[in-house]
Amino acid sequence: MKATVSRKAHFNAAHRLFNKNWSFEKNDAVFGKCNNPNYHGHNYELIVSVTGEINEETGFVIDVAILKELIEVEIEAAFDHKNLNLEVPEFESLNPTAENIAVVIYNKLKPKLDAALELEITLYETPRNFVRYSGD
Amino acid sequence: MKATVSRKAHFNAAHRLFNKNWSFEKNDAVFGKCNNPNYHGHNYELIVSVTGEINEETGFVIDVAILKELIEVEIEAAFDHKNLNLEVPEFESLNPTAENIAVVIYNKLKPKLDAALELEITLYETPRNFVRYSGD
Amino acid sequence: MKATVSRKAHFNAAHRLFNKNWSFEKNDAVFGKCNNPNYHGHNYELIVSVTGEINEETGFVIDVAILKELIEVEIEAAFDHKNLNLEVPEFESLNPTAENIAVVIYNKLKPKLDAALELEITLYETPRNFVRYSGD
Amino acid sequence: MKATVSRKAHFNAAHRLFNKNWSFEKNDAVFGKCNNPNYHGHNYELIVSVTGEINEETGFVIDVAILKELIEVEIEAAFDHKNLNLEVPEFESLNPTAENIAVVIYNKLKPKLDAALELEITLYETPRNFVRYSGD
Amino acid sequence: MKATVSRKAHFNAAHRLFNKNWSFEKNDAVFGKCNNPNYHGHNYELIVSVTGEINEETGFVIDVAILKELIEVEIEAAFDHKNLNLEVPEFESLNPTAENIAVVIYNKLKPKLDAALELEITLYETPRNFVRYSGD
Amino acid sequence: MKATVSRKAHFNAAHRLFNKNWSFEKNDAVFGKCNNPNYHGHNYELIVSVTGEINEETGFVIDVAILKELIEVEIEAAFDHKNLNLEVPEFESLNPTAENIAVVIYNKLKPKLDAALELEITLYETPRNFVRYSGD
């Protein structure tokens, strides 16, 4: 029997949306106020969902305490109270949109999980905007 | 890489559930207090989810500002503070259940999106009841 | 020792905001789209808060099961799935704004409670707009 | 046209996580404070999602009032204010993890639904931990 | 200038409501299913609110990191994943109603805070039932 | 009859907590990771609460559409997608803690309201941390 276990986490960060290869004017036209060179920020709400077989002995797909710890070590320690553009190496040349942050989180967590487990990342940039990525 | 971008929106409306081809008694038996001829109403919470490739230059599947504007023009302007039965043409002969409202929203938004994008509509009629429709 | 016990409840209703003594034009200028003669509606979220001494034998200010029942009988049965303007006598000549609905709820519940208990009504008309009334 | 209708429900229960075939020490190592022999408890939030064709006459996949009643009779009456380990027969020899509770709920509800309807169970054990099961 | 700083926390626990001096029948009549001798449980959501002067040098009423730590040490360590009746000494002869739990939390935290600070405890026993206590 | 009308709003911003008159070390000791010189950020949720007499002709304490507009012009336009330290003049020499942001919002809105109305500001810096200020 296969089930999906999800764990919510949280980090606060500053960011700026822009494409380094574009002029300020083009960035302004595409990213608007998100292109503020002084940065703005968000409380990112993260949901990490892991799908796999329910272990018959434990009744767990994955121990949520292990999942919580993994998110803390790999994601919260790297992203929380950080400036994503300046302090998170993955965004040195990658625009930190919600879509790209979700991809980076997926790529950081996937190799740490048993290969038989599927992974899906849901990331709320604001309570009204969120994205989902599952490695496709 | 494919991701899903979701945007939440909101509209308030009055409605009445009934089938015009049925007697009042049959409508009452099937729709109960939702068949009140004087109408009742809801704060509908809408989630519009768009799935597609992440654009390499922008980092967006779709600019959420464009999606927000599209929902305002196509859905909020047409439904907000309206009586769905009396003032929204799509429900002249279609019962405005949550399922049917989701279908109507899907059909209004789909042609406005790039054909390569998939669309899913989630509609909360109350905080405890919601529906999902994705064109199947 | 005094504490406050709160219970959340919920009702859906249609309403229209207008002053019967005003012209349609004046109502339109003041109430805008809320003056739609075909009505619109909301999921009202209600919080009933009762303050009083903690009973030493039960550990209760008021048994929340009794409070829940009182709200069902006095408020939900009267307001849920109703058109407030047409079907709730208190609004025959009273504009059903959130403020006035809170006052009506207060006035219906207060006499049903032990006189030593204080009462406060919080009413969400939408997730973003709410009012509070406590008999002052 | 196929849509999914979801209904939220709620029950409070006590439980203890452990494997009867293991020593207390092994249970402690695997389940930590969840292995407390005096039990702890949760407010479980349940979402029952039913997928099927929208009926052309009613506009419903399933009448949500019927779904609500089914959840009350089959799940809330059996689980609410209960000790899952001691009072719910399905957990006599099954560890009441969120995964296993979701499977039990699925197995109780599935035979009560029209065979053409698909079922998915989402169960929040806490606001931060939840599971999903759909019979795979 | 005086402001109020609030911090949310969370603990899960089992409990049973009853008065040791009453017969089982009387307890059953008053506490109903909450009197289940096998216990039931809740995810308690706690809001600790501290009111005082804003310090001119820090801009804080109280450092929320200190408040978070205080709640972890005094409340979460004592209550989380516990059976309140059997494992929390304050409830040995005090019925663990939400009102009484709020009073106990207030009494544990108040002496740990600067005497100039006012304290208010809000405790959600379920998402629909909550209590408030501020030492009156 | 007096009631309180509340309106929720939202802005995203970057900030850094520090006291310009202190060494980096002292700031680090007091503000920890909030003192990151590259900034971090939040989705601030704002509740503006206005208390006053219910107008007999309108049934309003204040028209919530006017309150919404006032918050947009005075607060959202000034704070949203901004770096509070660098771009909001009130924080040039004032540490942008949640407490101080609430005071600044109060001071910006109070003179725009009828003098007979009382004002209270509630500001969520994260879903778990919030402050309240009402001019005392």
Image: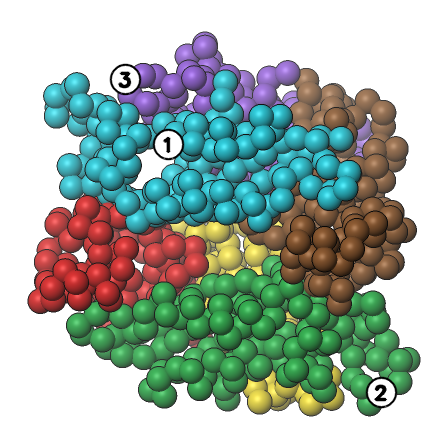
Chain colours: A cyan, B purple, C yellow, D brown, E green, F red
| Secondary structure beneath label 3 | loop
What residue sits right under mark 1 in the picture? A101
| Residue at 38 percent of width and 63 percent of height | F130
Q: Amino acid at mark 2?
A: Trp
**Distance CA(mark 3)–CA(mark 2):** 72 Å
| Chain bearing mark 2 | E
| Coordinates of residue D51 in the picture (x, y in percent) | 72, 27
Q: Which mark is residue E22?
A: 2
Give left or right: position of F91 versus E76. Answer: left
Q: Are marks 3 and 2 on the same chain?
A: no
| Coordinates of residue F133 in the picture (x, y in percent) | 31, 70
Instruction: Report which quarter residue C108 is drawn in.
Output: bottom right
Give left or right: position of C3 versus A55. Answer: left
Instruction: Report which quarter residue D6 is drawn in.
Output: top right
| Chain bearing mark 1 | A
Q: Amino acid at mark 3?
A: Glu
Q: Which mark is residue B57?
A: 3
Q: Nearer the viewer, residue F41 or E111?
A: E111
